Amino acid sequence: MDEMVEAIRSRAESDNINNLKPMRSKDSSFPLADKVADVVFISNVFHELDDHGLALKEVLRILKSDGILAMVDWKKEETPVGPPVEHRFSELDVIEISRLNGFELAETKEAGPYHYLVVCSKPPE
């Protein structure tokens, strides 16, 4: 995983992006202060989380008021690549789990042939 963080850091540097701080974190413990993020982007991770509730509460903690959580994950169907179907969550499951943990649905979209995108917002405080 450290090589992924370094690849993102290197790419941001080469593209002269200076407001991105790639870092490694645990499922439900992010090394950030409260209310510092405008957007949290999670890609192909939701199905891997041990405790979705704890992870989403941690995202709420670091998001600013009206912040956005964008999640891309595998469709719950057979695909030529990706994790086993039984490890995946449907788009509707992700929406419901997010809602139960304090988020409001903003939109959903297709994200290629094997993925979906769920965008949620943190309710204003």
Image (tube, grey):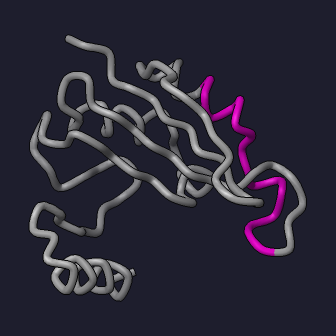
- Residue 73 point in image, percent of width and height: 62, 53
Which percent across, then down, holds residue 118? 56, 38
Q: Is residue 52 left or right of residue 110?
A: left
- Quadrant where the N terminus lies? bottom left
Where in the figure is residue 29, as x and y percent of width and height?
28, 50
Q: Nearer the viewer, residue 83 or 37?
A: 37
Residue found farthest to the front: 15
Q: Residue at x 87, y 53 (%)?
A: 77
In which image quadrant can residue 68 be found?
top left
Which of the 4 image quarters holds residue 11? bottom left
Give the residue at x 54% y 29%: 107
Magenta-drawn stretch contains 35: no
Task: Tell me which residue sits at (19%, 42%) in the image.
Answer: 37
Check the picture and name the quadrant holding the C terminus.
Answer: top left
Which percent across, then down, holds residue 24?
A: 29, 69
Residue at the image position 76 percent from the left and 51 percent from the top: 75
Up-down relation of residue 2 to residue 91 (above or below): below
* Residue segment shown in magenta: 81-96
